[in-house]
Image (spheres, helix red, strand yellow):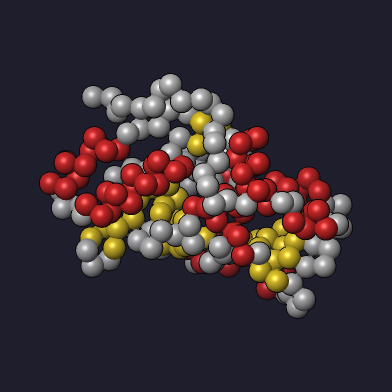
Amino acid sequence: MTDASDVSVSPVPIAPAGLSRRARTFVEAHGIRVPRRDLRQHRSAWIEHGIPAAEIGRIVAFQDRWGGIALPPAPFYEGGPRILEADCPVGSATEGWSFQAGDCRSSMAYGFMIGPEGAFGIDGYRWTPLHASTDGWVESLALADHAGREARTITTLTGEAVDSLDLDGYEPVPEVQGLTDTWWRGRDSLIALYRGEAVGLDAPQCLRAHVYGGLDEWGLQGG
């Protein structure tokens, strides 16, 4: 049986409330909305399999907020989820419940998940939360898109070179809700630190940083 979907929805997404102006513009100008599955129809079957009603509510809330939104590829993690889309939760009462955040764009050693506390992260060798919420992930995509267009120089560092970065004088960018991955704002530059694969796959060579230099005030903020 095919899932019911909101087939009549406009292909132009409306950005969820609570995002920065920069992220709202990014979602609405560069995103595409495709029909999303109605996960409410699985509620009874999931409850019969021992999934708590509160967890089902959490999945439905994610689907209502983000389900069916396709965004441009991320600059790392092979582009991130192809389309944000929830699926059946996995876990238990002791370890907590997680659910898929969307299918990968290509074959990967991990999947994108929403963790027990709502964090957006990758799960393969181990669960690694990247941002405290999906909002933070989308904010990071929007900031990377903005910085990539405004920067005079973009420098990529990998492996041990990432640990040599001097962040003295930089402040964390709060809207990305960084956990393992973080963004830092300096006097005329932005730095994105991608540590998720290094931590999640126990692979320090996968450390990566993007340094966006030569930014003016608009380039540093972008809304």
Q: Is residue 76 visible?
A: no
Q: Is residue 14 visible?
A: yes
**Outermost residue to the bottom:** 168
**Outermost residue to the front:** 17
Q: Is residue 132 left or right of residue 26?
A: left
Residue 120 rendering spot, x and y as whole percentages: 47, 56
Quarter residue 214 falls in: bottom right
Residue 17 rendering spot, x and y as whole percentages: 52, 47
> Can you say whether 43 is above or below 179 in the image?
above
Q: Nearer the viewer, residue 70 or 156?
A: 70
Q: Nearer the viewer, residue 57 or 132?
A: 57
**Outermost residue to the left:** 48
User: Residue at coordinates 58% horizontally, 44% vertically from top-left?
Assistant: 79
Residue 26 rendering spot, x and y as whole percentages: 64, 42
Residue 184 rendering spot, x and y as whole percentages: 69, 66
Which quadrant is home to the N terminus? top left
* Number of numbered callouts drawn: 0
> Can you say whether 67 is above or below 23 in the image?
above
Q: Nearer the viewer, residue 183 or 14?
A: 14
User: Residue at coordinates 23% horizontally, 60% vertically from top-left?
Assistant: 92
Quarter residue 211 falls in: bottom right
User: Residue at coordinates 74% horizontally, 51% vertically from top-left?
Assistant: 222
> Can you say whether 161 is above or below 74 in the image?
below
User: Residue at coordinates 27% horizontally, 38% vertically from top-left?
Assistant: 40
